[in-house]
Image (tube, helix red, strand yellow):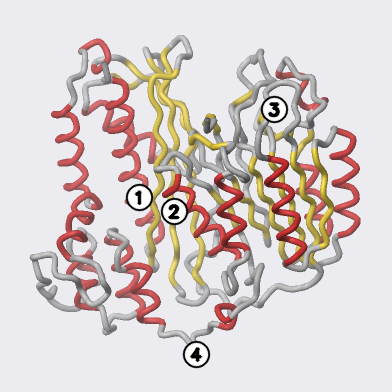
Amino acid sequence: MRAWFLCFAFLAALPASIGAAPAAAATLDGPRVALVIGNAGYRKDPLANPINDARAMSASLRQLGFTVIALENASQKQMHDGVRQFGDSLKGGVGLFYYAGHGVQVKGRNYLVPVDADITREDEVPYKAFDIGQVLDKLESAKNPLNIVILDACRNNPFVRESRGGGGSGLAQMDAPTGSIIAFATAPGAEAADGSTANGLYTGQLLRYMNTPGLKVEDVFKRTRVAVKQASGGRQIPWESTSLEGDFYFAQGSGAAASPATVNLDDELWQLVGGAGHPSAYRAYLEKFPDGKYAAQARTLAAQSPLAASTSRASPAQPPRDGTPAPSGFSFSAEEAKMDRATPAGRDLAFQQALTALNCPPARRNASVRLALDEPRDGAFAASLGQRLQQAGMKVGVGGDYVAQGTISVQAQHHRLLMVNEVAVSAAVVLNSAQGRQVANSIVRAESYAGGDVGTVVAELLQAQASQVATQLLTQLCRP
């Protein structure tokens, strides 16, 4: 039987220079060293797949040119010794740390759990577990041009039985230092699968794309995220925090040689934004190619946004209305349906329709709720979520019959080849009763592209995600 568990993770990376076009990135190379740890043989709640995952990862990394230090069912001392050896082996190339097993966060710090850990109280964790910060310190000291941290640790935590409020589920915020990428097997509040096959869902897909020639490291994790999301029916969505300053390929191939001289940038950009369903994506295309091959289509779709006037240079062309595929391969009728949900008016209508369909007991629908959200911006998501809940009849304030807890991630990075900004907003919220019982949860993620209006795009995505979260929470809360 497949085992599903609940995990919280949060990461936020918004580079300050996102609006500027960086110089062409160098391809990162040099000695490759990896530390791979798989912990499964816990006395309490053993896991099925971390050993298989760690062995498969070690074998794959060796084939990809890494020198691998491998640990299985490691004690706390063995983990300390392994990290020391790993740090001493780093020589200015590429450092990779992979961990599969139990993990826990206490007071904002993340700890990996050794198999010999005997932890029953929150205050014991820092002394009996392994602080992931030690790995980051070793990587930083090595001054590598590239560091990769992969944490498949979002399983349940059976160790902390007593908590005074400082320990949360899963892993806490970890921003990627310069020149690094931190990858989590699942997002905040998502359910992560330990797996019922030879490998866990996340690691199995990750290995597939790591060995695909010509994929940049960011694309490896992006494709892994899409595959895991599809395979899990949206219940597990991997996250990454990245601040890379160069290009890295696990497996070199023809794709690694791509450059503006060999790629049709117009076609390549439209492949990304054509089916995005966000006005910002079409505005980004028009900023880059105002007279491009797909400009008429982009203007038509971008015109559905209030900001269209700032980017449109001509009257919108009229697309076919019968679902006829456009040259890019997508249907205008399908895109318009998606665009309806991407505009404020469309979201209002969709939310009203969802409320009308709910048969919610008055005691729940008119209950009070307190918002306790961790978000990197100025509370924009909480404000939008609060408005939606009030629109449904709930009272939003400091006290409450329910507490909405969760984390919001905003990520933005510059696509070095196409010179547009990629923006992602993810949200995970759990609705608990005043007694601490979970009554609803929601995890959502939206990605789009932006030209110079990154802040506007982030605001649009935050509002859209808040509306979606409110709909999902209310639907579950009102369920008989």
Residue at position x 24%, y 67% in the image: 330
- Residue located at (42% from left, 49% from top): 230
State the quadrant of the C terminus. Answer: top left
Residue assigned mark 1: 461
Pick the front one: 69 or 282 = 69
Q: Measuring 86% from the left and 53% from the top, which residue is drawn there?
A: 87
Nearest-to-viewer mark from 2 and 3: 3
- Residue 347 image offset from top left, x and y in percent: 21, 44
On residue 478, the disc is none
Reading the chain from its start, which is encountered first: label 1 or label 4? 4
User: What amino acid type should be assigned to the residue bearing mark 3?
Assistant: Pro
Left or right placement of residue 178 versus residue 450 in this view: right
Q: Position of residue 317 (x, y in %)?
A: 12, 75
In the structure shown, which secondary structural element does the residue marked by tag 4 occupy?
loop
* Alpha carbon distance from label 1 to label 4: 33 Å
Q: Which residue is mark 4?
A: 261
Task: Answer with mark 2 or mark 4, whichever residue precedes in sequence.
Answer: 4
Q: Upstream in the sequence, badge 1 or badge 2?
A: 2
Q: CA distance from mark 2 to mark 4?
A: 28 Å
Amino acid at the residue labelled 4:
Ala
On residue 424, the disc is 2
